[in-house]
Image (spheres, rainbow, N blue to C red):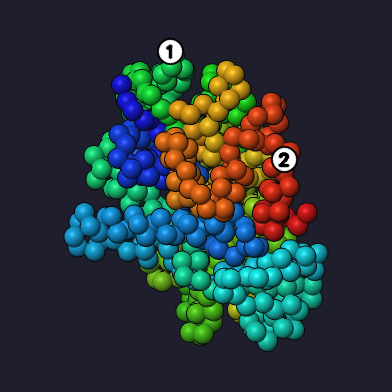
C-alpha cells in the first residue's frame, strides 16, 4: 500500500513529487524512461523562461513563483550536501528575451507596457528598433525586450535531476523504467498496474492518492476513471530544428556580432507561425546550437508511441533554416543561407486544451464532484516549463487540501482548476473563458 503515487517523472510530476516530499509525505514517483531522458515533452536542455506579461497575468506569476520555489530547492540541496554544489545558474541562463510584435498586436503591446513592473525596453517603430537595438525589421514591427534575472532559458534536464535528488533526500523512491499499464479505482483505493519496460514484468500496487502527470498519455491513462480527459487534452505533434552557423563563418564574425547573437536569444516572433527560438547549448568549438520551432505549427498524431521517432521532412528543415536566417539578418549578422548548417531535429508533442490553458485539477467522481484523492497536471500546451515549480506546488496543495490566500494564487488555481470540468463534454467552463482570454491571448495569439 502506497500513500501517494505520482505517475510521470518529467517536469510536472517531478515538481509535484518534490513539493509533496518536502511537506513530509511518503511518495512513489513512477517514470517510464531511465534517469536520463531520451524523448518526451521534458526532453532537452533549453526552454524559454520569461516573466513579462500584462498586469495580474497568471503566467507571469507561474514563472516568478517558480523562480522562488527553485531557489528553495537549491538551498535544500546545498544544506544536505554542505558544499554549495548547486546553483541557480545550473538551471537558468539569464539573457534578455526579445518579442517581435506587429501593428495588429498594438492593443496587446499596450496592455503589456501599461503598469509593467518588469524591466523592459520598447521600440514602437522600425526606425526606433534600429536606433535602440540595431535591428532591421519590417515597417510594421514593434519590439519589446525583457531584462530580468532568470529570464532567458531554463534547462529541464538539470531541473529534473535536482528535483529527483531532492525527492530521494527525503527518503522517497523514484522507480525508473516502469510504465503504468492499468489504472482503476477499487473500494476507495487506486489500483495501479505497472510494467517494467526492460523485462516486461508486471505488478499491481494500491495507493490512497494519485497524481497523474503523464503529458500526452493522460487520456489513455485515465480512460477507466476520468474518460473525459481523452477529449479535454488533445496531443499534437510539433517539430524542433537545431542548426548552427558554419564554424568557419562564425569564426570570421566580430566579437560584437558573436555577442549580439547571444544577447538576442531567446526570441518570440509573433508571425502566423508564432516562431520561438533560443540557444540550446554550444558545440565543442563554442559555436551556438540554435533551436527553433513554430508554436502554432501543429500536426495530428497517428501513433503517440511512435511520434517521438518521426524524423523531420525537408520542408520542416527548410522552415527552420529560413526562419533562423531571417532573424539573424534582422540582427544584421552577415550570414547567408549556405552559412547555416542543419544539426538535428526531433518531434515533440503539445498536449493541448481548448483554451490552451493547462489543467491542475482534481478529477470528478461519480457524483460529478472533485475527487480529493486524484490530481491531474496536464494540457501544458507548450507553455508549461517556465511555471514548473508552481504547477507542482498547486497540485501538491490540492492533494493535501492546503490553501494559500493571496489573490494571484487563488486566481491561478481557479484558472487551472476543476471548475472547468464541471460542465460535461466541454473543454472549459464558460465562466473561466473571460479570464483565460485576458491572461493568455498576448502569448498565444492576438484575439
Q: Whole-Å distance between the Cαs marked 2 and 1?
A: 34 Å
Q: Is residue 243 above or below residue 358?
A: below
Q: Residues within 10 Å of mark 1 (few under 14, many from 20)?
A: few
Q: Residue at x 74, y 63 (%)?
A: 108
Front-most of 141 and 24? 24
- Give the mark toward the camera: 2 or 1: 2
Mark 2, secondary structure of its residue: helix
Front-most of 14 and 304? 14
Q: Which quadrant of the figure contains the N terminus?
A: top left
- Left or right, 106 with respect to 416, comes to right
Q: Is residue 443 above or below residue 368?
A: below
* Residue beneath disc 1: 187
Query: On the image, which quarter does residue 317 sit in?
Result: bottom right
Q: Is residue 139 above or below residue 415?
A: below
Q: Position of residue 205 (x, y in %)?
A: 34, 20
Q: Position of residue 184 (x, y in %)?
A: 47, 18
State if disc 1 and disc 2 touch (CB < 8 Å): no
* Residue beneath disc 2: 431
Question: Does residue 293 appear in the picture of this structure?
Answer: no
Amino acid at each position: 500500500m502506497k500513500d501517494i503515487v505520482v505517475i510521470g517523472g518529467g517536469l510536472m510530476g517531478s515538481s509535484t513529487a518534490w513539493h509533496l516530499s518536502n511537506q513530509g509525505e511518503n511518495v512513489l514517483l513512477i517514470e517510464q524512461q531511465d534517469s536520463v531522458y531520451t524523448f518526451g515533452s521534458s526532453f532537452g536542455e533549453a526552454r524559454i523562461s520569461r516573466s513579462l506579461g500584462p498586469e495580474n497575468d497568471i503566467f507571469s506569476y507561474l514563472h516568478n513563483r517558480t523562480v522562488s520555489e527553485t531557489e528553495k530547492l537549491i538551498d535544500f540541496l546545498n544544506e544536505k550536501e554542505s558544499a554549495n554544489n548547486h546553483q541557480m545558474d545550473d538551471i537558468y541562463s539569464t539573457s534578455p528575451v526579445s518579442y517581435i510584435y506587429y501593428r495588429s498586436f498594438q492593443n496587446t503591446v499596450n496592455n503589456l507596457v501599461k503598469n509593467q513592473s518588469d524591466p523592459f525596453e520598447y521600440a514602437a517603430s522600425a526606425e526606433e528598433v534600429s536606433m535602440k537595438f540595431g535591428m532591421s525589421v519590417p515597417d510594421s514591427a514593434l519590439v519589446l525586450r525583457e531584462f530580468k534575472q532568470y529570464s532567458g532559458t531554463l534547462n529541464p534536464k538539470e531541473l529534473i535531476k535536482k528535483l529527483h535528488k531532492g525527492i530521494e533526500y527525503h527518503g522517497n523512491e523514484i522507480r525508473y523504467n516502469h510504465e503504468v499499464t492499468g489504472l482503476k479505482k477499487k473500494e476507495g483505493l487506486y489500483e495501479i498496474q505497472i510494467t517494467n519496460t526492460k523485462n516486461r514484468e508486471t505488478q499491481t500496487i494500491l495507493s490512497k492518492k494519485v497524481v497523474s502527470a503523464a503529458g500526452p498519455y493522460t487520456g489513455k491513462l485515465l480512460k477507466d476513471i476520468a474518460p473525459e480527459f481523452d477529449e479535454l487534452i488533445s496531443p499534437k505533434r510539433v517539430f524542433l530544428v537545431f542548426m548552427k552557423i558554419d564554424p568557419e563563418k562564425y569564426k570570421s564574425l566580430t566579437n560584437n556580432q558573436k555577442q549580439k547573437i547571444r544577447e538576442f536569444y531567446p526570441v518570440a516572433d509573433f508571425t502566423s507561425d508564432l516562431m520561438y527560438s533560443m540557444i540550446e547549448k554550444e558545440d565543442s568549438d563554442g559555436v551556438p546550437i540554435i533551436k527553433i520551432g513554430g508554436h502554432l505549427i501543429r500536426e495530428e498524431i497517428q501513433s503517440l508511441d511512435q511520434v517521438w521517432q518521426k524524423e523531420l521532412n525537408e520542408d520542416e528543415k527548410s522552415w527552420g533554416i529560413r526562419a533562423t536566417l531571417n532573424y539573424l539578418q534582422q540582427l544584421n549578422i552577415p550570414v547567408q543561407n549556405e552559412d547555416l548548417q542543419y544539426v538535428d531535429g526531433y518531434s515533440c508533442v503539445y498536449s493541448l486544451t481548448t483554451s490552451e490553458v493547462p489543467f491542475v485539477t482534481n478529477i470528478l467522481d461519480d457524483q460529478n464532484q472533485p475527487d480529493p484523492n486524484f490530481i491531474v497536471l496536464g494540457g501544458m500546451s507548450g507553455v508549461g516549463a517556465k511555471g514548473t515549480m508552481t504547477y507542482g506546488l498547486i497540485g501538491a496543495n490540492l492533494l493535501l487540501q492546503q490553501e494559500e490566500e493571496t489573490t494571484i494564487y487563488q486566481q491561478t488555481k481557479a484558472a487551472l482548476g476543476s471548475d472547468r470540468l464541471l460542465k460535461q463534454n466541454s473543454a472549459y467552463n464558460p465562466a473561466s473563458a473571460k479570464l483565460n482570454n485576458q491572461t493568455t491571448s498576448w502569448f498565444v495569439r492576438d484575439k
